[in-house]
Amino acid sequence: MSTAARALAAAGDAESARDVSALDDAARQAAERLGRQRKGLVERLIYGPRPEASELQSGAHGHDRAQNRGAAAVEAAIACMARGEAFTADGKLSAALRAAVAKEKAYGFTVPVQFGGLGGSYPELALAEEAMAANGLGALAVEISGELTIGAGSLLAYGTDGQKRTFLPLIAEGQLMAFGLTEVKIGVNAKKVRAYVEPDPATGGFRLFADGDRNKLWITNATHGALVGLVARLGKDGKQVGLFVTRLPERDVPAGIADHEFWCQGSNVGAFTPNFNARIHFQNFPLGKETQIQADGVEVLFYCLRMGRCMLAAMAAGYQRMFAADAALYARSREGVGGQVSKHELPRQHLGTMLGGALQSRALSHLSLQQDADGVDLAGLRDLTKSAAATSALASQIAAERVIGGRSFDRSSRVHEARANMHVFGVVEGEDDLILMGMVKDVTDTFTGKYMAALLSVIQSINQGPDGRPLPPAQRLLRITPTTLFAEPRRCLQATLRLLTKGAFWRLKGWILWNLLLEVLTLPLHLVPAALLPRYQLVAPPLRRYARFAERRLRWLRWAYLGINLFFQLELTRAQIPLQRLGKVIEHLVSMLVLCHHVKYQDDSQQRVAALRCEQLMAQVKGLRLLTGLWQMERLRALVAGVGTDIEQNRSSLLHGVQPQPFAHAWEADAPRKKS
């Protein structure tokens, strides 16, 4: 069990401890399958050893070296759109568009040649995905990304030879593949899925039950006749989660027609409306024995999502370039007060926000892809990349609206059509704030396990009665503070004495002293201009100060995390605000550093965009106080808790008299099927 899981258990949250432990195990298994031996980049930036500049610039080199094998597919898609054939009358991706890009093997981009694919690399796919999104074809990029990262990716990594021979050629020729994870009642936490399979003695296969609130929901690329990977529990009350690859029937199967039921209908989601997105119902649905992927479904998910997050960042870069292009055209064409809009400072700042977000998303995407190719653990970086790209894309959407004004809401405007999509980017594959907290856990887990576990175990020990059983929640101590010293002197003294006997406590003291000594010894270097230090001579001159600021602040975060731990202690298992804030600071600083190194060999215009973006990020970092804001965060958490309790207990008068709208997809297990 990981340190985070043990801390949750010590705080009395046994259910969360089990969930975190199971997810940690799956992530660890996926990392082992990938053969990851090197520590993640973000962890090394904070705790050392510091990565070389060449490693930080590897993503830029990978981007520049990548062949543009997707150019033919992009050109075919743009030509189809120019002919007015890319979308149907109701705004869906057309069969003509799919046929045009399938001819160029876009759907089999990363599928090996022996299975009929193009045999391309993920950096090449990222170039194509960005180009599609930049030219108004973001929905096509979403479709192909899902097809390849979590569809074909799961088969390539875990499928048998027979499964690969069966399904990969179908994917390569353009048949859609979905991944059925989320359910009406369950989000992206695969360990919580409630759909299940039972053995079918008659065939040696399985029967799938995903009915009512077990229906698979918000499944992109799911439609009649499509391939789908289905995540389901092995047995209704089973602990293990499996993955099954099958083809959906060509039409609904109502009750009474066969010994099973099946239907597939639209999820009624307002984002990515050109795509297929479905709610799927299975009752006693037959699955052949050969459909089962011989691996834990959650492990497969972790394995594939790393590439999904890199592709999301590539698409975010494309969307933001599209916003900037449309807003720039408007600003150059529109006469405002005192001349063209493009001549004014505020619109220029908004345009810089869009271009800066695009460059940031591209840099993070390609660095992550190169790190993966080099065998570096993406823990931390993959989540940070997704969060930064999604956040910047939404900010760029707003910036485009500020420049274009009311015309951005015209129904034919690409900016308008993208609005819901940019909101969804921050939610798909996990909500960004929660992802950031997971990133903090991944980055700090080694330090926590080595140095902080003793403190957590001591507090846990004084929360047990003489019989060894946990004390009631009201009697548990989650923090030892001056107040608790007076309220519980005996237990606090007991904890102090136990702590002094722990070797990890003295290791922590040694770590503090050693790192303080290093800080003192390196203080004179702070007076040396960045231009004189060999490390920063490898960065373009306008960006050296930002690279130095980012690295210095990242190293300082080791102290910030220690301080947060000492302040909150076991309460940190419930304190989401400080962890989210810490995660956001890490996101901004790593983004700054990656930007500085990415544009080393790019033209002056990109370097100017990078400098503006770094300045914006630096301003945000300085506004997010960590150690100096601990008491402010404590007040904030108390205020949040008060409002949350009022809402939870229906005491918020602002909500009284407001009838909530029912869920679009009812949670009741016997919810009737919505008529389409």
Image (cartoon, helix red, strand yellow):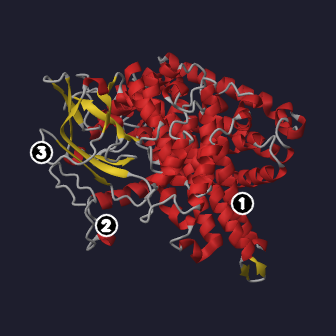
| Image-based side of 670 in relation to 36, left or right | left
| Image-based side of 576 in relation to 541, left or right | left
Q: Is residue 5 visible?
A: no
Q: Residue 209: name its quadrant.
A: top left
Give, as a three-letter code, the residue at label 2: Ser
Give, as a three-letter code, the residue at label 3: Ile
Label 3's element? loop
Label 1's element? helix
The earlier-in-sequence mark between 1 and 2 is 1
- Which residue lies under the disc numbered 2? 652
Residue 508 - label: none
The earlier-in-sequence mark between 3 and 2 is 3
Q: Position of residue 227 (x, y in %)?
A: 36, 38
Q: Mark 3 or 2, which is nearer the eye?
A: 3
- Which residue lies under the disc numbered 1? 352
Neighbours of disc 1 within 10 Å: few (<14), some (14-19), many (20+): many
Give, as a three-letter code, the residue at label 1: Gly
Q: Nearer the viewer, residue 541 or 230?
A: 230
Quadrant where the C terminus sits is: bottom left
Neighbours of disc 3 within 10 Å: few (<14), some (14-19), many (20+): few
- Which residue lies under the disc numbered 3? 257
Q: Nearer the viewer, residue 347 or 448?
A: 347
Q: Is residue 207 visible?
A: yes
Q: Position of residue 645 (x, y in %)?
A: 32, 57
Residue at (69% x, 36% y) in the render: 67
Q: Residue 654: name its quadrant.
A: bottom left
Q: Position of residue 206 (x, y in %)?
A: 21, 28
